[in-house]
Image (cartoon, rainbow, N blue to C red):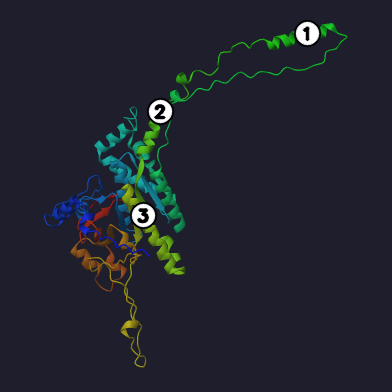
Amino acid sequence: MPAALSTESILASSLIADEDIDNVVDAVLNGKDVRKAGQARVGIGVKSVDEALMGGLEKGNLVGVSAEVGGGGLDLCLSLLVNSLLDHPTENAAVIDSTGNLDVLRIYSVVYSRLSSDASLLESHRTGLSASATDATVEDVAAKALDRVNIMRVFDLVGITEAIEEIRNELEAKPKERVPLAELPVVEQEPATEQKRTEIADSEDEEDEMLFDSEISALSKPPIAVAPLVPPLETQPLHNPQADMGSQNAAIERKTSLILIDNLSHVLSPLLKKDYAQANSLLTALLRTLVHLSTTHLLLTILLNPSPTTRQPKPPPTTPSAPKPQLENIQQLPPSPSIFASNVLIPALGNILPMYLDIHLLVSKIPRRKADAGAMYAGSGRGGARRGVEMVDVIEVLASRWDGRGGRWGAFVVRSEGGVRDA
């Protein structure tokens, strides 16, 4: 029996490049903002939010945005989508919608608002359309930007998986090798020869026999050369190889660079109630696929995750005869991860989702000023105490795998015409 070979150990230091070690030292000790080469960022357009995110969200990362349904989280994600489209005219975006609440008119309004407020950006997109489109209106440019948004309506987890697989196939598809027409071999077809007919002539009619002989002699003569009706391949006006190659290059350059999924919890909740273990297994496999896809193709993948407002349940009332409930029998909900004590939002899928995210954001509404907070929480919390209270949306970085952005926050306000602005 041959002796078992011992496994050679690998030093951990050999798995890390010197450049990565230098970046870690600069980021931790010197406080420098170190970014990898080619790792572009997509900003929000709000000063306090971009400062909290250190310039924006990096491509190649999986980002979770937990927000209350109907809050500012969706507007924040749409602003990211629009900024990615307008700042990178050769890139597309994909939206996987499982709720059916995606408002395309809202996306158009955000694009229109951004183009109207930035004349240089509008001019660059006008010249990017064509040489004759320099007088295109803002509406035309905004509508053209929507052509680069691919919306996929899904109804279950299988639909989300198929949509992601379709995006993967589009990203990994290799351009077909096209052979120029001038290099195609020309095959000359020989003229078809007609077979002679065999007829029995009437022996009593000599004139018919003479006519039959003349037809045979005519068929035996070589055919007359006829000029081809199709012009040469080099001068065909119906086919333009350069135009085809140009359209092919445009298709190659315009690849998907941003994916927005709204949302996983909507399709996963029925599975969790039916089979919790299987649902967790499917979610884990899906998240691993998204991480690999985002890292390999430098995608900015955003998962919009609902965060319902939950409060600790009150213990049941006790009577003198009834025993007091024990502490372990009282259901304890997990605490809110927010740094604000008044924020009671708890992100859904909190037991699995954060492990695969590169950065986890929480969007919530809080009172803008101290007086607003006093009016908000005064009295017994009835609706009358909320009148006249001014609220702002706050984005918090719950966790960040890179750059140490955890704990940072910024405030913004949702525009009525679409998009977000400084608070």
Asked whether 118 or 62 is in front, the reply is: 62
Compared to 294, does 242 lie above or below?
above
Task: Please state which of the two labelled residues, at mark 3 or mark 1, is closer to the viewer.
Answer: 1
Looking at the picture, which amino acid does disc 2 mark? Ala
Compared to 385, does 164 lie above or below?
above
Q: Where residue 265 appears, x then y in whole percent?
A: 39, 62
| 25 with respect to 116 (left or right) | left
Circles 3 and 1: CB atoms closer than 8 Å:
no
Quadrant showing the N terminus: bottom left
State the residue lying farthest toward the front.
1
Residue 102 seen by the camera: no
Spatial CA distance of label 1 from label 2 is 58 Å
Q: Which element is circle 1 on?
A: helix
Work out whether mark 2 precedes mark 3 in sequence or the reverse, and give the earlier one: 2
Spatial CA distance of label 2 from label 3 is 36 Å
Residue 232 seen by the camera: yes
State the residue lying farthest toward the bottom.
321
Work out whether mark 1 precedes mark 2 in sequence or the reverse, and give the earlier one: 1
Residue 304: name its quadrant.
bottom left
Asked whether 2 or 113 is in front, the reply is: 2
Query: Which residue is identified by label 2?
Result: 243
Q: Residues within 10 Å of mark 1 (few under 14, many from 20)?
A: few
Residue 329: name its quadrant.
bottom left
Q: Which element is circle 3 on?
A: helix
Query: Which residue is identified by label 3?
Result: 290
Task: Please state which of the two labelled residues, at mark 1 or mark 2, is closer to the viewer.
Answer: 1
Q: Which label belongs to residue 211?
A: 1
Q: Where residue 52 appears, x then y in whole percent?
A: 20, 55
Looking at the picture, which amino acid does disc 1 mark? Leu
Work out whether mark 3 precedes mark 1 in sequence or the reverse, and give the earlier one: 1
Q: Where residue 161 appears, x then y in whole percent?
A: 43, 55
Quadrant showing the C terminus: bottom left
